[in-house]
């Protein structure tokens, strides 16, 4: 409000306090435009200016639309910045809080009393956020988010509080999965001995380089770390210990491919092969792969003599070996083999006299199970678990579907679905 030659701040709503300005010579120029500082999405709406003179009123209607700041970045980037610049020289008691509102509420970063407050932020963002050290002097309240993933996409709001007043900044973050980076898709059937994740560097050879394999959705993310010519298990995710390896001459051949032993469906995900400089501060190469571990599916029609659930592993298994085929939902032991004779007394009565495994399975490594006279009731998920001296070493999942009498009786042969 402007009246009697001056602004009337006591008349305005507190939301606009210290945020509006009009020209000082507005009566002479007739320019009644309003400047609104630090517009946010909440300021969007219809504004009307009423100019009263000698009982006459002139109106001007303006529709304001404040667009949300959008930031896009591809997954795999080192970091992304959510921008917010406000006035300089903020008071020392200013509190700055970055919050993610959608798809779920989480405190991302809190700054108050002159320092960051990591104990107040959600654990997902722990050690991943950073703000400028001199933010109070510069007024740059931008937030840097390290290693953004698709799960970080959403609406972020920064609230800056000082002297009871609040300033907002809304940022829509979109983290896109790089189509180029994920052009390499590695598929393998569960139960295979191993799978190779390719990574080759054609750049300049550097001494003392470090190779880091990570998986984006794990914590810790480290899958395999090679420093110079030595593998380092420090900080490695427990599920990959003893299951990964690289070529001994990887640094000489520039072939940093990773061999993952005994791939399981839970190993499916996005893996990144990063080549770091000598100080491990800069990524010289960053290659992403989408790994898919697929359970084997077997289809057969009711009425056939038998069906085989396939599982071929390495030959000449030594030591005390136990092989258990189990069915899930409902849970039933279909077949148990312990080093020599089959343990028929341990299997569920539904499978009594209906299962067979190869006699020379330890020599051939063929742990496949033959199920006689399969019926529609035998359909379900079967898992083969292999143990050596009480230690679990291998697993294979097979989904069996036995079609009833009404479905394509003309085809009696077993199918192994790709």
Image: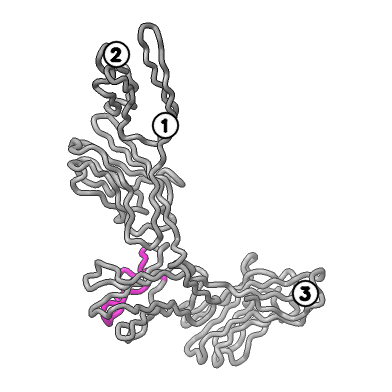
**Chain part drawn in magenta:** 220-239
Separation of residues labelled 1 and 3 (CA atoms): 69 Å
Give the label, 3 or 2, closer to the camera: 2
Q: Is 378 placed above or below 145 here?
A: below
Looking at the picture, tell me which residue is in the foreground, 262 or 329: 262
Task: Return the residue found at the far top.
Answer: 54
Instruction: Pick the quarter of the image with the C terminus.
Output: bottom right
Q: Does the magenta stretch include residue 373?
A: no
Q: What kind of element bears circle 3?
A: loop
To which residue does mark 1 refer? 64
Q: Is 21 placed above or below 278 here?
A: above
Q: Is residue 372 left or right of residue 49?
A: right
Give the label, 1 or 3, closer to the camera: 1
Task: Return the residue found at the far front.
Answer: 29
Separation of residues labelled 1 and 2 (CA atoms): 24 Å
To which residue does mark 3 refer? 302
Q: Does the magenta stretch include residue 223?
A: yes
User: Label 3 crowding class (10 Å Cα cut-off): few <14, some 14-19, many 20+?
Assistant: many
To which residue does mark 2 refer? 3
x and y percentages locating residue 393 in the rendered image? 47, 79
Q: Earlier in the sequence, mark 3 or mark 2?
A: 2
Q: Toward which corner of the image does residue 343 lie, by quadrant?
A: bottom right
x and y percentages locating residue 336 in the rendered image? 60, 80
Looking at the picture, tell me which residue is in the foreground, 78 or 163: 78
């Amino acid at each position: 409000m402007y009246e009697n030659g001056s602004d009337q701040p006591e008349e305005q709503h507190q939301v606009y306090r210290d945020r509006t300005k009009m020209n000082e010579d507005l009566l002479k120029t007739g320019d009644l435009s309003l400047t609104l500082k630090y517009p946010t999405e909440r300021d969007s709406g219809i504004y009307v200016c009423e100019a009263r003179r000698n009982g006459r009123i002139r109106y001007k209607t303006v529709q304001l639309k404040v667009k949300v700041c959008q930031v896009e970045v591809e997954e795999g980037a080192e970091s992304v910045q959510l921008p917010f610049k406000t006035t300089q020289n903020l008071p020392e008691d200013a509190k700055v809080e970055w919050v993610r509102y959608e798809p779920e509420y989480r405190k991302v970063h809190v700054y108050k009393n002159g320092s960051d407050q990591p104990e107040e932020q959600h654990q997902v963002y722990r050690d991943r956020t950073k703000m400028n050290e001199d933010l109070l002097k510069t007024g740059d309240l931008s937030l840097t988010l390290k290693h953004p993933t698709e799960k970080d996409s959403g609406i972020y709001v920064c609230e800056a509080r000082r002297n009871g007043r609040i300033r907002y900044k809304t940022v829509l973050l979109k983290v896109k999965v790089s189509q180029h980076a994920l052009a390499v898709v590695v598929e393998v059937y569960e139960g295979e001995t191993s799978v190779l994740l390719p990574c080759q560097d054609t750049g300049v050879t550097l001494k003392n380089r470090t190779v880091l394999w990570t998986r984006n959705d794990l914590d810790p993310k480290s899958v395999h770390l090679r420093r110079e010519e030595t593998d380092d298990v420090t900080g490695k995710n427990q599920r990959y210990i003893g299951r990964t390896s690289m070529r001994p001459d990887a640094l000489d051949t520039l072939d940093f491919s990773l061999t993952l032993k005994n791939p399981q469906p839970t190993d499916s995900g996005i893996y990144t092969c990063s080549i770091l400089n000598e100080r491990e501060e800069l990524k010289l190469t960053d290659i992403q792969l989408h790994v898919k571990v697929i359970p084997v599916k077997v289809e057969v029609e009711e009425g056939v003599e038998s069906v085989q659930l396939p599982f071929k592993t390495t030959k000449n298994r030594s030591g005390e070996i136990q092989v258990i085929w189990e069915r899930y939902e409902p849970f039933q032991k279909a077949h148990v083999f312990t080093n020599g004779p089959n343990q028929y007394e341990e299997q569920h009565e539904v499978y009594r006299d209906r299962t067979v495994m190869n006699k020379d399975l330890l020599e051939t490594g063929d742990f496949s199970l033959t199920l006689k006279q399969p019926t529609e009731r035998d359909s379900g998920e079967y898992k083969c678990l292999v143990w050596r001296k009480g230690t679990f070493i291998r697993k294979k999942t097979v989904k069996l579907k036995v079609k009833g009498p009404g479905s394509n009786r003309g085809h009696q042969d077993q199918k192994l679905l790709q």
